[in-house]
Image: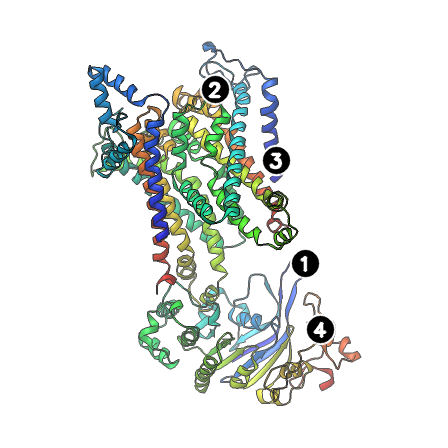
Amino acid sequence: MLSIRNLSIDYELPGAPLSVLRDVTLDFPQGQVTALIGESGSGKTTLTGAVLGLLSSNARVRGGQVLWKEENLLRQDPERLRQFRWRQASVVFQAAQGAWNPSLTIGAQMLDTCLDHGFPAHAQRREQLLKQVRLTPERVISAYPHQLSGGMRQRALIALALMLEPELLILDEPTTALDLITQSYIFDILSEIHQTGLTMILVTHDLAAVARLADRVAVLYAGTLVELDTAQEIFENPRHPYTQVLIRSAPGVHGGEVARGAEGLPPDLRDRPRGCIFASRCKEVEERCRAASPPLENGVACWRRK
Amino acid sequence: MKKRLLLSLLTVWVALTFTFVLVRQMPGDVLHTLALQLQNTHGLAYAQAREMAKLQICYDPDEPIFSQYCTYLSNLAHANLGRSTTYRIPVTQILASALPWTVFITFLSAGFSFALGVTLGFWTAWRRGTWLDPALTFYATLTQAIPDFLLGVMLLLVLGVQLQWLPLRGAYSAETDPGFNLPFLVSLGQHAILPVLAFSIPAIGSWALSAKATATSVLGEDYLQVARAKGLKPWRILRDYLGRNAIVPLISSLATNLGALLGGSMLIETLFGFPGLGYFLAQSIGTRDYPLMQGLFLLSTLAIVAGNLSAEWLSRRIDPRSRR
Amino acid sequence: MKRAGWAVLLTFILLALLGPMLIELDGTAHYEERFAAVSWKHWLGTDYAGRDVWAQLVHGSRDIMLIAFSTGAFAVLLALLIGVGSALAGGALDALLVGAIDVFLTVPSFPLMAILSALFRVGNPITFGLLLALWSWPGLARSLRAQVQVLQHREFMEVARLMRMGPWHILWGEIFPNLVPYLSLNFILIARNAITASVGIMMLGLVPLRVENWGMMLNLAAFQSGALFLPQGRLYLLAPLSAIVIFQYSLILVASSLEEYFDPRLRRG
């Protein structure tokens, strides 16, 4: 349904441009949850920004395509992109950082979305969705954001994201900054939504969320896709050295063994290395790793795993 | 809020006491001067004229100071501000006739400059990095350098004297009949343009700058990103997401600003011969008309205090975050 | 742009210092030369009494500078005394001074300045400056108080205290240097406001200063001599008006260059 082809994006900065995404090719099959994982700065947010046409003003697309059912979204005019957003692809944002407008009620912010998309603004649908995320509609609709708890705001955001019956749902760190009980509550709700066959992209660095929800996992490192596989394979048999470090550094995934993350710092994105992007921190690095960048083959981009 | 209220009362009391002391400490015997004046104009004996003068300016130096102070306060409580020594009518009458003019010109100017300045500021913040930005900054610094009354002089010179497009002085033409009729309203509008422009031209720049600053900080908020992701139409984002949130702090500064303006601008009103509070205040200082000066000064203090209090109240009222 | 501000300010100061020695002011009326046009003899024409406008402008600049800078100096001193004193004293005295600052901030200051300077018949620029300063200090005092309160809790203050430095040493050696940038900036801003206020009061004719004072020139031109309505009188009105605007603009530029100098975050490119 959505597929990204050889996407490269730079940010214009004083001095040299910052290359945040380099030649990323990735498909999001219908009805599946694809998780995008990686450290901050790995390009996850830029990728979803490119899908929604919400890149910051200094972003420059250097090449590639974002295909939505054969339509290249990167070539669409702002009005088409505006209509595409939320109607076809919507986002569950992180509620913790004020994703709600403090001056409008929750109900009004659900309705204005319908109005601007010419979507029949059924008050009924609003109520039904709020019930689906286990909120009391009477209480929430007339409430201002600050009157709700963090968990309630997050659930209301899920309802908001489903308002226009989108075909693609992007989950942007949906459980960060929530307590564990609320987190698991949110996961239950999201799993239910997953059952309905909605295609989802889960952007997170929380591996517990990936384990609970994802069918497939895409691992990004410094703007490069280094591994793509089923969730089960990623957790049980990670192949790329970076994925291995990432999985093992997560507490509680491998029998409570807390490993250290990769040593060293990510590469300078203003001046990408010629070889493998992970070479500078890889323990298994060889001569050929520094010479040329490995392509993604059989779901992994590593010379040693070919 | 309680603290604000207390402070306001304190300020009013200080102003009251200040005017009380002022009349009594003035170089030159105020009472004597007025008595001599009355003696001449009314043909009275000096003692009689002096008694009359005492009543007019509500000041009796023969009584002990404490009882003078009590009389002064009780007179104020009964809205007895004495009689103007130049106009020879009760001060309250002058205040009542001047206040509507000042309210008229002040609300018109403040409303006009606020609406235009805030829109301009929001728009500049919204279209970051266009030519609007440096243009706005230049406009604001340039108009800051020109005191509003000097701007008034220039406007008067160009639009009034040179081009003769607009009337020079007064609030309406003497040939019209005050009331709800077209010629009067037209003349009212024509006379208001110059003072309103003199007030507004610098004010637009400063409103635009502060609106730009608050809007820029709101633009960095997550809910604006959400609004864009929701595919809302730009005008709705500008109005409901940016505007609604950025205007909250501006509205309370508008209230403060209105309070300060309501005291009347001595210079602009004098320049345009506009019969508001500021005009009479300047007149009363020039002619040493103590009762009138006192009344006007108290009124402008009250206006400022009221402006500050309503700013406080408004900022609590319009910010939904303060609703529990 | 910023440099131009300094250059203009320096020109004005030099004009005020040296000008009156070089250019002679003839105060006697020559009615036959009333509102004369620009000529070699009269660079900016003459006023309603045939007196040279340029000479008045040069001689009047002294008064304006004196008023502006004496207001600035007095107000900064008052604000220092009250703001810093209040922060250092603490307790009841602090509460009292804070109350005073708030009251002074609230009362209508321009009418007060006008009333006092008119009723006390202020006759010289320095007294006038002092009078204006009485109503110009509270904003600065309030922010100085806040800054000193912050500074008091900084590490170097603790060190100074541990080294048993006396309170005066702490005040002059540690606190004062930290306030200098802020004080100089506010000196300029207060001086600028003092120009507006003093010119306004003079223009209303409430303070009888010399006829060559810019504010007096404006008063005479706009309200007394009818120069506003006479085409040949324009120059007499516009000369002091432009001088004031240019002077104010140079002060704004100087203030913003000071701001950038002291706060590197504002420096661009």
Q: Would you say A260 lies left or right of A53 here?
A: right
Which secondary structure lies at badge 2? loop
Which amino acid type corresponds to the residue marked 1 in the rendered image? Gly
Q: Which mark is residue A15?
A: 1
Tell me the subunit letter for badge 1: A
Q: Would you say A56 lies left or right of B229 here?
A: right
Q: Answer few, some or many: residues within 10 Å of disc 3's Cα (few below 14, many 20 plus, some between 14 and 19).
A: some
Which secondary structure lies at badge 3? helix
Q: Which mark is residue C6?
A: 3
From this view, report whether residue B172 is shown above or below residue C48: below
Tell me the subunit letter for badge 4: A
Which amino acid type corresponds to the residue marked 4 in the rendered image? Gly
Q: Nearer the viewer, residue B128 or C214?
A: C214
Mark 3 vs 2, N-terminal side: 3
Same chain? Circles 1 and 4: yes
Q: Nearer the viewer, residue A138 or A128?
A: A138
Across and down, in percent, residue A87 comes to 43, 73
Q: CA distance from mark 1 to mark 2?
A: 60 Å
Q: Is residue C1 visible?
A: no
User: Residue tagged by mark 4?
Assistant: A264
Q: Would you say B175 lies left or right of A125 here?
A: left
Q: CA distance from mark 3 to mark 1?
A: 33 Å
Q: Is residue A269 visible?
A: yes
User: Residue tagged by mark 2?
Assistant: C210
